[in-house]
Structure formats: C-alpha cells, structure tokens
Amino acid sequence: MYKIMTPGPVTVRQNVRDARSLATTNPDMDPEFVEFYKETCDMLGGLMNSSGDTYILGGEGILALEAACASLTEKGDRVLVIDNGLFGKGFADFIEIYGGEPVFFTSDYRKPIDVSELEAFLEKSSDFKYATLVHCDTPTGVLNDISEICPLLKKYNIMTVVDSVSAMYGEPVDVDASGIDILCGGSQKALSAPPGLATLCVSEDAKKAMNNRKTPVASFYASIPAMMTYYEDKWFPYTMPVSDIMGIRVALENVKNDKDILARHAEIAEATRKAVEKSGLSLYLEEGFANTVTVIELPDGLTDEVLLRTLREKHNLLLGGGLGDFSGKVFRIGHMGENATVENMVETMKALDSTFAELGYPLDVSLEEEFKKNI
Ligand SMILES: *Cc1c(COP(=O)(O)O)cnc(C)c1O
C-alpha cells in the first residue's frame, strides 16, 4: 500500500474503516436509520455552525456542487462565477447545463480574490440570483476569504454557493456568521473518510428560493428539494449508502474530538511553506495559501510525471500532480485531515529530499531538516 499524501483522497483512520464494515440495515425500512442519518447531518451542521438544513448525499464532492447549481438555477438566471482557479471556473459548466447564464468575475490565479475589486465590480453590476466561489481551489491551493466575500455578496442580495470541499475541517468555516447559502463538502478531503459522499449545508434563503421555483429541478439525483422532506416523510428519494454514512459519522466524531485540528493544519502548512522556500524550490502562489495543500513549482527540466513516479516506485509515496493548465508545472502535497501530522510530513519531506537528489536536482537545504526546525 502507498502512503497517500495527496490533496484528497487522504488517509482514512482505522476507526472509520471499522465502522464501514459493521452489520448494515435497510435504510428505507429501519426507522432508527432516519434518526441516525439526521443526527449525523446535524453533527456536520454543528461543526460548520450552520443553523439551516444539512444533507449527506451518495456521490463524491462534485455532486454537492452540481446539486447546488441544479437546485438554484432556472432558465435564464444570471449567476456570478467568481473565478481564480480551475474549480472556480468550472462552476460555469453546471450553471449552463441547468439553463443559467454564467457571468465571470475572473482574477489572478496566483492570488486570493481581492474583496475591494469585487465590490467595485458589484457596484456596477449586481443583478445575479446567486454567486459561486471556491474556498480553497485545490489545483493551486489558493484560499479565498469567504468570511468577507459572502457577506459582501449578501449585501447586494446575492446568494452564495461555496465549494469548501478541500478546505472545511482544515480551515475555519462559520456558515451562519458568513451568511453562506449553500456550503458544499465531500467525504474524502480533510474529513478523512473514503470518497463517496457529498455534503450540503443549506440556508433558509436558499430553501426559500428552491421552494419558490417556477419550474421543477431538472434533475432527480442532484435535487436538494427531493431530499428536503425526508425527515417528516421518513422516506429518502433513493436508498442511502448506509455503510458510507456509518463511516462518515465516525469521521465527523474524530473531527469533533480533535480540538487542535485547525491549529495543527496551520502549523504544518506554515512549516511546509518555510521549508520549501529555504530549499530553493518555489511556491506556486504569491499569497493566500490554504493550510490544507501546498503547491510547488517544478524546477526547469523536471516533469511531475518523473517526480511522482520516482516517489511512488522508490518511496511508496503518492503526491498530487498538476491539473489542467498546471499539468507538468507543479506538484502538490495534501497535508489535510489525517495526512496532517508531523510524522507524515517528515516522511514526505525526507522522500522529497532524496528524490530530488536522485533525479539530479539537489536542494539548497534539506526539506526534512527545515520542516523539523519550523514545527
Ligand atoms: C476534490 C474537490 C472537489 C470534488 O471533486 P471530486 O472529483 O468529487 O473529488 C470539488 N472541489 C474542490 C475544490 C476539490 O478539491
């Protein structure tokens, strides 16, 4: 087995794996399952300080993004797509599929969204039903300040769909304080359960907008309204993945019991960045570093394919490569959730030290030593 220090899926703790192997029930017929499901959703909502409704859907994080767009968009709706990364830009596809009209606010991919620039844009144009934005855009690791951006959009009566799939549980999120209308998450990032579940925290305003639709949602599986009355009706629109839910419940308990989780992410990420800068390698971003993933430029002449293969074959270690336009230009360390421990990072840095040396790109100083100095 490889050590997976990728920006999702991440390492899964034994107690989560154990929970997934327990005897299962028929989730459609067993009244206790509805209670268990609701408690699990409420626990997630509590961790995110969301007083609205929370749903856990069978399907990876992408389903949360699609369900949010499917459920809010009606034909001709103008939607603001806040784009400073691949996931940010990608929201436009969902909006178009469901008949909406995406309007881009695009900015430098090496920096977080500048809130005053966004405000200047909104001064001129604010006729949008909702806006989409990404908390941590994983291909670059840029972190957008949702606690500033979402309230600003609300001031202009624009609802917000936030993709925090690769940030939540590793970066602070306060749904109520920030006025987030739909918070999208997944099981396989910092929450540290296996891939397979999408999570949604949905505000009252978002529910109202869905209930006031003139046309039905153009999807069944990606419809939030289809889930809305499950508790009153004791009926799910489709059979819930019971073992996945039992696993995510324990993963949520792990997070809840881990009082230092955010501080640990911050310390590990900071020490990683310092070590990278000292070593002579370059961080991809200029500013706005997320604490869940670090994206590092490859030295001239070295491809991510060669670096990742050597790490895999000689050190049993998986890291992330470049996605989309970043393909071949960067590699990525996912230090989120269960991956975010000092031991895991020391092992990762050690493997990188010897791999860069083996490939003929010796570093100025040892990543392992620098990381240890800063932790
Ligand atoms: C991982 C991730 C998703 C979900 O993508 P999957 O392909 O379902 O894993 C969505 N948004 C961001 C920012 C992500 O990092």
Image (spheres, grey):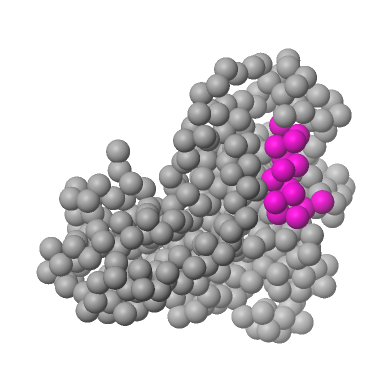
Is 41 in the magenta?
A: yes
**Vertical relation: 107 (above or below) 23:** below
Residue 140 can be seen in this image = no
| Residue 71 point in image, percent of width and height | 73, 46
Q: Quadrant of residue 341?
A: bottom left
Q: In which quarter of the view is residue 76 placed?
A: bottom right
In the displayed structure, 50 sits above or below 11; it is below
Residue at the image point whose x is 22% and y is 65% from the top: 353
Q: Main secondary structure of the magenta part?
A: helix
Residue at 61% over, 25% down: 242
Depth check, front residue: 274 or 296: 274
Quadrant where the N terminus sits is top left
Residue 155, percent from left and from top: 82, 73
Examine the rendered structure and indicate whether residue 316 appears above or below residue 356.
Answer: above
Q: What is the total number of numbered labels drawn onto the structure image? A: 0
Q: Is residue 243 left or right of residue 214?
A: left
* Range of residues picked out in magenta: 37-51
Left or right: where does residue 157 sit relative to residue 73?
A: right
